[in-house]
Amino acid sequence: MNLNQVTMPVSDMDEATLFYRKMGFLQIVDTPHYARFECPDGDATFSLSLSDDAGVGSAIVYFEHEDLDCWVGQLKEKGFTFAEEPKDHSYLWREAVLFDPSGNKLKLYWAGENRKNPPWRVERSA
């Protein structure tokens, strides 16, 4: 099993697609009500769906980058505003927080080996 994608609600498709392209994502589907993007590295994708419920949910989308501080600096030079600057957390991830134009919370982070193998990892199956 593999996760295919995450779809986020947006209130303004043009504004949202511009935001994500400006962040560096490659837009691969473009309709008035739906857009899909490829991440620059790896094979992950995510999509946007025009919705009256944009910004209402509590989902948080994480985008990983090994050189987080440099990436955040590049985005700030492009005019992105961060709610939280990069900082180290007790769960061994370094994260920065920003919001897209529809209010979706985005965490840009780097966790290295701790992403899937933190010291407290447990392995359980059904």
Image: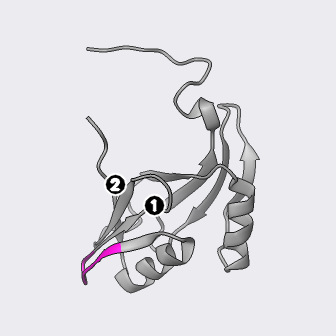
> Which residue was labeled with disc 2?
6
Asked which quadrant contains residue 27, the reply is bottom left
Q: Is residue 43 visible?
A: yes
Q: Is residue 11 left or right of residue 121?
A: left
What number of labels is visible? 2
The circle on residue 67 is none
> Secondary structure under badge 1?
loop
- Judged from the image, the secondary structure of the residue bearing numbered disc 2 is loop
Task: Look at label 1 and name its amino acid.
Answer: Cys
Q: Is residue 21 left or right of residue 95?
A: left
Query: Which quadrant does the N terminus fall into?
Result: top left
Residue tagged 1? 39
| One can see residue 101 in this view | no
Q: Earlier in the sequence, mark 2 or mark 1?
A: 2
Residue 93 position in % (x across, y down) = 65, 39
Magenta residues (range) = 28-34
| Quadrant in the rendering for residue 51 | bottom left
Residue at 48% of width from left, 68% of height from top?
103
> CA separation, marks 2 and 1?
12 Å
Residue ID at (51%, 59%): 105
